[in-house]
Amino acid sequence: MNLNELVQHIHHYSISSENNPFITQLDNDSRTVKSGSLFFCIKGFTVDGHDYVQQAVANGAVAIIAEKPIKAEVPVVIVRDTNRALAIMADVFYGQPSHSLHVISVTGTNGKTTTSHYIDHIFRYHSKKTGMIGTIHIKIDDETYPVKNTTPDQLLLQQSLHKMKNKGVEMVVMEVSSHALDLGRVRGCDIDIAIFTNLSHDHLDYHHSMEEYRNAKGLLFSSLGNTYNIEKPKVAILNEDDTASEYYKKVSSAQILTYGIEKNSDFMAKNIRYTAEGTYFDLHYEGKISPVKLKLVGKFNVYNILAAITSCYVSKIPMETILKAIGTIKGVPGRFELVNEGQPFTVIVDYAHTPDSLENILKAAKQITTNRLICIVGCGGDRDRTKRPLMGRIAVERADWTIFTSDNPRTEKVEQIIADMESEVSNNKYEVIVDREKAIFHAMKSAQKGDCIIIAGKGHETYQVIGKEIISFDDRKVAKAAIKAKLRKQN
Ligand SMILES: CC(=O)N[C@H]1[C@@H](OP(=O)(O)OP(=O)(O)OC[C@H]2O[C@@H](n3ccc(=O)[nH]c3=O)[C@H](O)[C@@H]2O)O[C@H](CO)[C@@H](O)[C@@H]1O[C@H](C)C(=O)N[C@@H](C)C(=O)N[C@H](CCC(=O)O)C(=O)O
Ligand SMILES: Nc1ncnc2c1ncn2[C@@H]1O[C@H](COP(=O)(O)OP(=O)(O)OP(=O)(O)O)[C@@H](O)[C@H]1O
Ligand SMILES: N[C@H](CCC[C@H](N)C(=O)O)C(=O)O
Ligand SMILES: [Mg+2]
């Protein structure tokens, strides 16, 4: 595709030359530029891409998209907003892949990854080729690719969707974070179904207030479009029990479907029974009642399943197939993941890293615990500090014993993060073991029959970020080693 063909999709631009080079790839990082690249200068949080034009040209860039005049031996196109231009041009360059894919997006504070995995599982059970974009990885049919972000930037997003199209993928489920919406990462993406899981305290370092945070998520629903296209109707699927849904109903022109447990909703779970084997409930929808069996625990998982059922049902998968499929869901990596080495106590690794998710997971664990509930938890550095006292208080109030430890301190002092977590704790049912590995070994050593140990916050993560360094660390592996060490000592 030539430069002129691409830039014609932007309303306001000026171009420094009449040359019309052939563009072989798009780049927003000078380090990945190759001969034939069109380089987009993006102002980041750390550096400004405009400062890397010379490097981009040296690496083979044949044209530049910038927000201000830049000296370069190649054509420079000046646009008002390079981020927006990248979203539009990437969509065009990659042949608008989202337009012919069935795209389901999931937003909300907690449950995005979990719900996405359930949806993917149901579609695959229904023999569809699927793609998934989210916190754990990008998955294209059976191949997975590592990720830096829950929702990739505009370029990687369109590239991934394009690869999916080429691989014969029919449907994509994608997590959409509030950061992504605020930064316009999903602009130009034709989304068919948008799911809202819930809204609770997180990311207030970035969004400043709950209202701002709620509104950022609202961008997904306000940009969803309307239902007038009969071939591709747009549907917003909202959690009726979360008050933020009222706002999303207002900002969206799409068809609205609701799910819930407490309030009357289109897809509703009633008569819920939580047992050691799993969770059972009656699904009420369209005047019908269907029994549902899950091998999952926790009320929050009933919400995730309801959202998954609703989105698959409106995607025309028969309810009978959906219900059979969900009976075979085993779980999601790092989400309530059991570590079992034959020990007489329960060990669970979970990604709870917000006050609400920590509370939920401790409540769910309590239901299956016959002795003490022990919680190992930390908070991330260089992230929302205001959630730390809340998480500290919740852990100590809900668990019988808590160990505060480190969880990706990044450039902050772990001791300060833990002091923040301790600041609103009102009893002494806790201790501090800064080193996470030592904390896990200590918990295993002191565990007794019937105890349940929740290792919270890192879930699927295979690293610990200390300073600028990334160290290999996996809660599941460490827990396994600690249990084995204990069992060896006993034998
Ligand atoms: C705060 C934030 O969102 N930062 C994102 C941002 O990085 P940045 O602004 O620091 O980028 P930068 O380093 O300043 O670079 C600016 C530009 O110069 C370019 N550059 C830079 C260096 C160079 O040598 N040459 C060059 O061309 C860069 O490629 C970039 O285009 O752009 C990067 C590329 O798209 C993102 O990976 C990065 O996410 C970082 C890793 C991050 O931690 N983001 C978090 C806050 C985030 O987005 N989280 C959400 C939600 C998580 C959840 O589910 O809870 C997510 O969706 O992941
Ligand atoms: N619907 C839910 N409501 C509240 N908590 C939940 C829900 N689903 C999962 N959780 C809890 O939140 C944790 C994170 O879940 P999940 O990874 O699905 O969320 P996410 O929204 O993808 O998070 P992130 O924004 O970090 O990607 C789980 O490990 C569990 O403890
Ligand atoms: N998606 C979350 C990840 C937090 C995971 C936790 N382990 C941490 O590092 O704080 C965030 O960006 O806030
Ligand atoms: Mg996620």
Image (cartoon, rainbow, N blue to C red):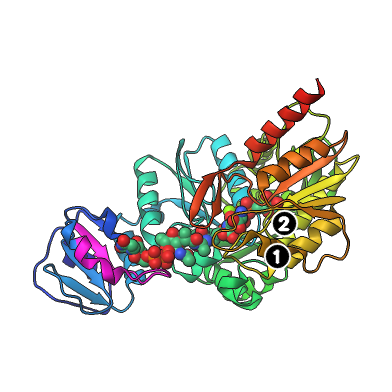
> Is 71 left, or right, of 89 in this rendering?
left
What residue is rendered at 13% in x and 67% in y?
74
> Badge 2: few (under 14), some or many (20 or more) residues near its Cα, within 10 Å?
many
> Badge 1: few (under 14), some or many (20 or more) residues near its Cα, within 10 Å?
many
The kind of secondary structure element at disc 1 is: helix
Residue that numbered label 1 is attached to: 388
Residue 282 among magenta residues: no
Question: Three-letter amino acid code at disc 1?
Answer: Arg
Quadrant position of the N terminus in the picture: bottom left
Q: Where are the magenta residues, as a range? A: 37-56
Residue that numbered label 2 is attached to: 357
Ligand 1's quadrant is: bottom left
Q: Nearer the viewer, mark 1 or mark 2?
A: 1
Establish whether ligand 2 lies closer than 8 Å to the Cβ of label 2: yes
Residue 49 among magenta residues: yes
> Quick check: 203 above or below 268?
below
Label number found at residue 430: none
Q: Earlier in the sequence, mark 1 or mark 2?
A: 2
Name the residue furthest top. 491
What residue is rendered at 46% in x and 53% in y?
148
Residue 399 at x, y percent in the picture: 84, 52
Quadrant position of the C terminus in the picture: top right
